[in-house]
Image: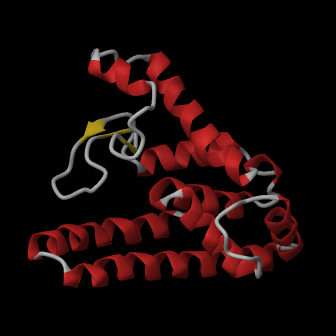
Amino acid sequence: MANFEACYEKVILIEGGYRLTEVKGDRGGMTYAGIARKIWPKWEGWDKIDAGEFDAELTGMVRTFYRKEFWDRILGDDIGAQAVAYHIYAFAVNAGLKTSIRICQRIIGATPDGIFGDKTFRKLDGAIQDEKDVRIFTTTFSLLKIFRYKNICMNDVRRKYDQVESDQKFLCGWINRVQEGFI
């Protein structure tokens, strides 16, 4: 069975650790430990951050958030292959839960509805029988992530130049995320 702590520690490093950031052009706006304020405005950690309380309790709130909002919703504890769970989880953190689940569902031949329920779990469990299956899944998942990132940048051509420049500046970082899954 997959281990949340191992996946979490890897993802929190990719997300920049326990730092408050605001990168010009990032649609998520202000983020703390990868949690975007625009996307998660009701996360209780924002109250502590606004009060300047960067402590162990806040770190625990981040861990709890990632487990509840991503890991538990992909049934991470029940996935048999650590690498498979990592890929689904890490991309859910980066691109959104439904997006990550849909990619998983396309690979395993499940209906791509963005919901990780019993049917998806059974299909995934049946598709991953050995290390070869794990390599095929993770490689395919990684390629589909790169295609998604490319499409984000290509679709920006229709928007203002400054936004195109903004999304393209993230492309190398996004591709680095894909490579992190193989380290």
Q: Nearer the viewer, residue 114 or 56?
A: 114
The residue nearer to you, when weighing 160 against 10, is 160
**Residue 46 located left or right of residue 127:** left
Q: Position of residue 68 (x, y in %)?
A: 63, 38
Residue drawn at x 23%, y 74% is 168
Classify residue 127 by image quadrant: bottom right
**Coordinates of residue 175 in the picture (x, y in percent):** 39, 72
Coloring scheme used: secondary structure
**Is residue 26 left or right of 118 when viewed as pictured?**
left
> How many marks do you count on the picture?
0
Relative to residue 111, is residue 7 drawn left or right?
left
Relative vertical location of residue 150 with respect to residue 36 in this rendering, above or below: below
Q: Vertically, is 96 above or below 134?
A: above
Quarter of the picture containing the C terminus is bottom right
- Specify whether 34 is left or right of 69: left
Q: In the image, is residue 19 above or below residue 84? A: above
Q: Residue at x 43, y 52 (%)?
A: 14
Depth check: give the residue in front, 31 or 143.
31
Residue 75 in the image: state x and y as whole percent: 76, 51
Q: Residue at x 12, y 75 (%)?
A: 160
> Residue at left 55%, top 42%?
9
How far from the left and from the top, in percent, is residue 117?
79, 58
Q: Where is residue 64, by image quadrant?
A: top right
